Amino acid sequence: MKKLVVIGDGGHSKVVRDIVLAGNEYEWIGTLDDKYASFIEKDERFSGPIHTVDRILERFGSQVYFVIAIGSNRIRKAVAEQLGIYDVKYAVLVHPSAIIGSNVNLLPGTVVMPGAIVNSSASIHTHCIINTNAVVEHDCILYSYVHLSPGAILAGNVTVLEGASIGIGAKMIPSVSAGEWSTVGAGAVVIRDIPPCCTAIGVPASPMKHIKSL
Ligand SMILES: CC(C)(COP(=O)(O)OP(=O)(O)OC[C@H]1O[C@@H](n2cnc3c(N)ncnc32)[C@H](O)[C@@H]1OP(=O)(O)O)[C@@H](O)C(=O)NCCC(=O)NCCS
């Protein structure tokens, strides 16, 4: 099995570790998070602050892969930029109960959670989260650092731009888009394009007066 280091040690990271344990491609060997003051190795697993990534690369070289298991899209991006690791060193993690259609493109760092469905010819860029029971229909494009929350549904040909968060149970009808770093509130139904950095709620979804990222 390939060795995997999980970056981030919060709630989202627990679910990501479960995906690793459920599969047979990666062996979880350690966790990095700045809540750890120093590098500690115990029972063949280690923990340490994020900057100790250099030490891990030195020790395990080409055998080691990483995943940034941080739910906030902005923090996930900031950590990826801080680490500066080549994309090829990031794992794609797919829970065994997820369904991935034909000709789907899943790029490094993306995590697909239990029960999610990604249908034919969808393209999901780096460091996205396809959360529990979310559905990505055919030909959708999700750019980097998107979070599709549990139970969210994207119809065919939807585009979600970088950093956008689609809330729990939200839906987007065919061919609409969510702009960069936009937020679609829980339960919203998107029937028109959502502008960048906008927070939209309701059925049909419309912009809120103030902006707040997930
Ligand atoms: C849309 C959202 C980001 C707004 O958060 P916020 O800016 O903190 O908003 P507030 O809680 O201050 O609510 C502001 C108003 O919007 C309403 N509102 C908030 N979220 C709403 C939603 N999803 N649908 C409808 N109305 C909503 C509130 O009732 C409130 O109305 P009021 O002013 O009449 O009382 C948030 O409510 C939301 O839906 N987040 C999604 C969370 C999620 O799916 N997380 C995934 C984790 S895995």
Image (tube, grey):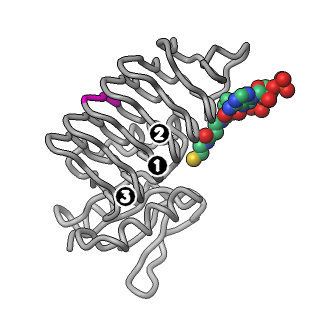
User: How many circles with numbers are drawn on the protein?
Assistant: 3
- Residue tagged by mark 3? 53
> Which disc, if any, is residue 148?
2
Is mark 2 in CB contact (under 8 Å) with mark 1? Answer: yes
> Which disc, if any, is residue 206?
none
The structure residue drawn at horizontal position 24% and vertical position 64%, both measured from the top left corner, is 64
Is 26 included in the stretch rendered in magenta? no
Range covered by the magenta-colored residues: 139-143
Q: Earlier in the sequence, mark 1 or mark 3?
A: 3
Q: Is residue 77 left or right of residue 167?
A: left
- Residue tagged by mark 1? 131
Q: Quadrant of ligand 1?
A: top right
Is 142 included in the stretch rendered in magenta? yes
The CA span between labels 1 and 3 is 26 Å
Residue 173: x and y in percent read 44, 23
Using the image as rendered, state which of residue 84 and residue 18 is in the foreground.
18
- Density class for disc 2 (Cα within 10 Å; few <14, some 14-19, many ≥20) is many
Q: Earlier in the sequence, mark 2 or mark 1?
A: 1
Task: Find out if the beta carbon at label 1 lies less than 8 Å from the nearest ligand 1 atom.
Answer: yes
